[in-house]
Image (cartoon, helix red, strand yellow):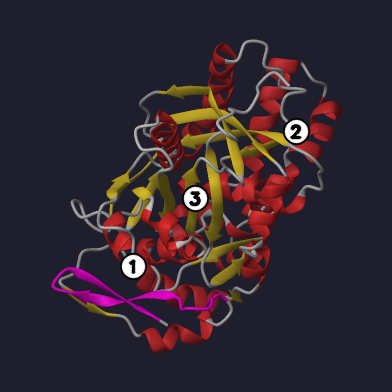
Amino acid sequence: MTVQPVEAPRGFGIEALNVYCGAAHLPVRTLLEGRGLDLSRIGHLMMETRSVSLPCEDPVTHAVNAARPLVDALSAQDKERIELLITSSESGVDYSKSIASYVHEHLGLSRHCRVIEVKQACYAATAALQLAVAYAASGVSPGAKALVIATDVAMVDENAHYAEPATGAGAAAMLIGDRPDVLALDVGAFGTYSYETLDSARPGPDFDIADVDRSLFAYLDCFTHAFADYRTKVPGADLATDFAQFALHTPFAGLVKAGHRKLMREVLRAAPDEIDADFTARVTPSLTYPRIVGNLCSGSVYLALSSIIDHVPYAGELRVGLFSYGSGCASEFFSGVIGQRSRAALARMRIGERLASRTELSFADYEELLTENMRCLVPARSREVDVARYKPLLHGVIRDGGHLVLRGVEEYHRVYEWV
């Protein structure tokens, strides 16, 4: 291997990882049929189903429900060592007050914890991860941990056309520190590429805009240039042999396939049959979860990483190449090592089981929920949410100890409860 994981004692990176992808899902075919869209596009999207938030769910509940199993598994001493909480989101609930402040409260973290929210479209969680690893590795507070949570809801309806079936909802939570049981980051091995473009945006709290073609080309352009920059940090890095698996930002699986094809052509001059075989071996395992969740925004690449760990049979250690892209745009290619501890750590989260337990919606159910969901981020002085109405849909995802839901808004303050 060209790149070696950092030693001290086992490096730094992701100690624990969990994803929460809502309590309900809608089959992509059902959505396309309901909208009267071309069913042949399913093959291009490479999607099966997508997560759908309930009106009692929002970016705060997604974040807490993803992170709570990680926090609950810690000793009191280790929980106290969480010195940094970063939430990343395109779905802010206030222009000033951060999602992180609510998350901090409902996770019961120390009052001596730094609490911030970051925004850079679907790249933000990776920026937060790198900042958190740098803090842990700096030695300014030996043994310190950080909690990074990417969390979003979908603000799309029929006006989004084919982006609607690809858009998911939920959160990915990562505990960062010096016991990287899930992913030992190759610290210092990264490549970045960024520039300004309006490929997608959310100028208001209740709708997204997107230039689909511009976004696709920006993703592909950034992938190529970010990997080229990685090779300047890691001379001799070999695309063909250094990475056993790839976890890429997955707006939809079809775009990942296009990005992989472009990089293989340009870097390795690979033939079509070689590209197809490589995609099956090194990329397809990362798509198992994204294909049944949809775009998790800045949590997407970590959903793909979870998919690799849960589905690739391996012994020993594997190096994973990860690519994160965020509209606007910013991107990074980086790498890390997974091992047998990764599989054991993730198995405790029962991610596949939780995804399978989501309630399947009909198109009529989805349309009824959509009206309320589109109000999720719209500021309101007061608002009531009929939690009891949605409890039957939550039964499959409630863990021991409860599940956080949004109860309403009182004088602009969002109010939550455990069910």
In the picture, the disc for residue 415 is none
In which quarter of the view is residue 357 placed?
A: bottom right
- Residue 379 lies, with reference to residue 390, above or below; the image says above
| Category of crowding for the residue at label 2, using alpha-carbon neighbours closer than 10 angstroms: few (below 14), some (14–19), many (at least 20) | some
| Category of crowding for the residue at label 1, using alpha-carbon neighbours closer than 10 angstroms: few (below 14), some (14–19), many (at least 20) | some
- Residue identifier under label 1: 106
- Residue identifier under label 3: 174
- Residue identifier under label 2: 244
Provide residue 403's location: percent of width, then percent of height. Answer: 45, 76
- In the image: residue 285, left or right of residue 133: right
| Category of crowding for the residue at label 3, using alpha-carbon neighbours closer than 10 angstroms: few (below 14), some (14–19), many (at least 20) | many
Q: Amino acid at mark 2?
A: Ala
Q: Amino acid at mark 1?
A: His
Check if mark 3's residue and mark 1's residue have beta carbons within 8 Å: no
Provide residue 209's location: percent of width, then percent of height. Answer: 38, 46
What segment is highlighted magenta in the picture? 397-418
